[in-house]
Image: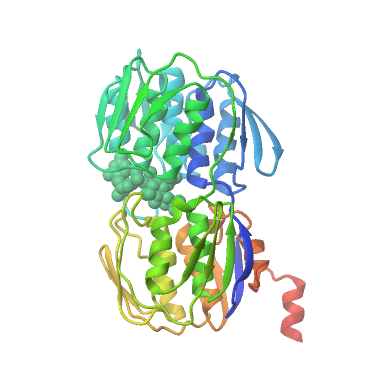
């Protein structure tokens, strides 16, 4: 288990290139199962979540050729099993996308229930509602979700809550079903649109992705394709907030500015400068920020996956800020950790109040999930002194090369394994 040693304060200066979107990749890689030919995926982020889903496809029998760090070719034709055991499924939350993909391709799927998460309860009732609407029989026994259908028939499915996962899974199951499936109250995140674009490039007929009504006209066959995954909206937003929190000046390259609108709006509201270019944004930090309130909402509202990072930034603003977390029931756990660095904030259920003008100081903390871990890295770079961040495996689920990307902009971050220290650190202590 590794940890990060971070010495602050740092002023991030320079530029960073954003990798492919994690939440698009973990949906698009399983979607390859639906193809009858080889697919080549480019701009795949080299993170543990994508490595795990690729490993699952290999264990199912697919052939995967890694062309380079961010490009893979997948041939799903040798896949013969439709069962994903707990030993594989437990390793990541989005393993449940295998249900939609296997059901959509083979009319059956048997996948272990996904693991819990630090965000609160994470039901999948809407996913199951969608599968059943299409005619699948779904049983849950021994923590395995068992779906089977004689045929999948397109139907309207109304999602009483906006759900990224349910929208993805229903699309995957419906894309080869007979007739028209309509997903009402669908999620509109950029990764939903990216998945629809990928499936359509394979020959699917999906219309309306990015709106709350998605129509899927079933097709008999999906072909092979070369496809490049969109840049990661949340990775980009994380570096934008890091630039603001360290009062730096950073050019964030390979982004789609429209995906960042809600983050840009909030940064400008508190006093940071954001310059937009065709495929980049520049964030220039200010010496002083004013408070603001945030309500996390489904896209295009302020993303819940940016909430911890912004919470740390608001703790440094003048005045009291309030964050309402409207997506997850338990996404303020990170406050227990960042309080040790001087963040003064109190959460009551899904609302947290952040006292402003906090002077952050280095401290040992432990990441509780990947976005909380990113927030702790931001706090440690803005803080005076030395911080240690344990459980960085959480962060590496979703941020490709985060240490080298930040150090290239002037951060002072060393990765050490918990049970020993690299020679350079020992020498430094002796110096
Ligand atoms: C996706 O999770 C993301 N993960 C999450 O990002 C993100 O926080 C979330 O969407 C919201 O944007 C991936 O894309 C792999 P939901 P997902 O279904 O699909 C409730 C990160 O940091 N709900 O949109 O699991 C649910 O409890 C991760 O990258 C049901 O009630 O989220 C939540 O309150 C963390 N029943 C709300 O809907 C269901 O069947 C939204 O969840 C499904 C969801």
Query: Which quadrant is home to the C terminus?
Result: bottom right
Q: In this view, does 321 lie above or below 75?
A: below
Q: Position of residue 378 (x, y in %)?
A: 51, 70
User: As drawn, is 402 to the left or to the right of 422?
Assistant: left
User: As drawn, is 243 to the left or to the right of 63?
Assistant: left
For the point 53% across and 40% down, the residue is: 25
Q: Where is residue 139 in the image (x, y as percent from the top left)?
A: 31, 27
Q: Is residue 3 above or below residue 384?
A: above
For the point 62% across and 66% down, the residue is: 406
The quarter of the displayed image where residue 177 is located:
top left
Query: Which quadrant is home to the N terminus?
Result: bottom right
Residue 368 showing in the rendered view = no
User: As drawn, is 319 to the left or to the right of 392?
Assistant: left
Residue 394 showing in the rendered view = yes
Q: Where is residue 154 in the image (x, y as percent from the top left)?
A: 31, 19
Query: 431 or 326: which is nearer to us?
Result: 326
For the point 27% across and 31% down, the residue is: 129
Q: Position of residue 278 (x, y in %)?
A: 55, 52
């Amino acid at each position: 288990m590794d940890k990060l040693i971070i010495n602050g304060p740092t002023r991030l200066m320079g530029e960073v290139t954003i990798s492919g979107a994690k939440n698009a990749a973990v949906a698009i890689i399983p979607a390859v199962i639906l193809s009858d030919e080889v697919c080549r995926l480019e701009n795949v982020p080299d993170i543990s979540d994508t490595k795990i889903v690729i490993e699952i496809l290999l264990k199912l029998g697919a052939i995967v050729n890694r062309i380079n760090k961010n490009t893979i070719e997948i041939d799903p034709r040798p896949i013969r099993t439709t069962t994903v055991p707990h030993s594989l499924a437990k390793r990541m939350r989005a393993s449940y996308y295998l249900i939609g993909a296997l059901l959509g391709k083979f009319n059956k799927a048997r996948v272990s229930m996904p693991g819990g998460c630090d965000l609160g309860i994470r039901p999948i009732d809407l996913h199951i509602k969608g599968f059943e609407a299409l005619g699948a029989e779904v049983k849950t026994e021994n923590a395995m979700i068992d779906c089977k259908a004689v045929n999948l028939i397109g139907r309207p499915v109304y999602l009483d809550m906006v759900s990224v996962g349910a929208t993805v899974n229903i699309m995957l199951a419906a894309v080869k079903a007979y007739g028209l499936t309509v997903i009402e109250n669908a999620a509109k995140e950029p990764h939903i649109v990216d998945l629809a674009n990928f499936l359509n490039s394979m020959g699917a007929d999906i219309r309306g992705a990015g709106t709350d009504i998605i129509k899927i006209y079933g097709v008999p066959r999906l072909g092979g394709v070369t496809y490049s995954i969109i840049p990661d909206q949340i990775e980009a937003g994380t570096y934008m907030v890091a630039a603001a929190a360290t009062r730096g000046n950073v050019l964030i390259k390979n982004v789609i500015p429209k995906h960042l609108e809600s983050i840009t709006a909030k940064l400008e509201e508190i006093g940071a400068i954001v310059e937009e270019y065709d495929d980049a944004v520049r964030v220039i930090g200010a010496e002083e920020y004013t408070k603001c309130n945030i309500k996390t909402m489904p896209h295009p509202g302020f993303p819940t996956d940016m909430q911890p990072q912004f919470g740390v930034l608001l703790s440094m603003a003048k005045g009291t800020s309030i964050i309402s977390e409207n997506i997850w029931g338990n996404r303020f756990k990170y406050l227990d950790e960042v309080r040790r660095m001087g963040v003064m904030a109190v959460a009551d259920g899904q609302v947290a109040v952040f006292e402003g003008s906090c002077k952050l100081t280095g401290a040992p903390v432990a990441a509780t999930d990947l976005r909380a871990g990113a927030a702790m890295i931001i706090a440690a770079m803005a803080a005076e002194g030395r911080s240690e961040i344990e459980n960085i495996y959480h962060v590496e689920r979703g941020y490709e090369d985060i240490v080298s990307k930040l150090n290239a902009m002037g951060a002072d971050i060393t990765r050490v394994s918990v049970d020993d220290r690299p020679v350079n650190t020992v020498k430094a202590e002796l110096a």
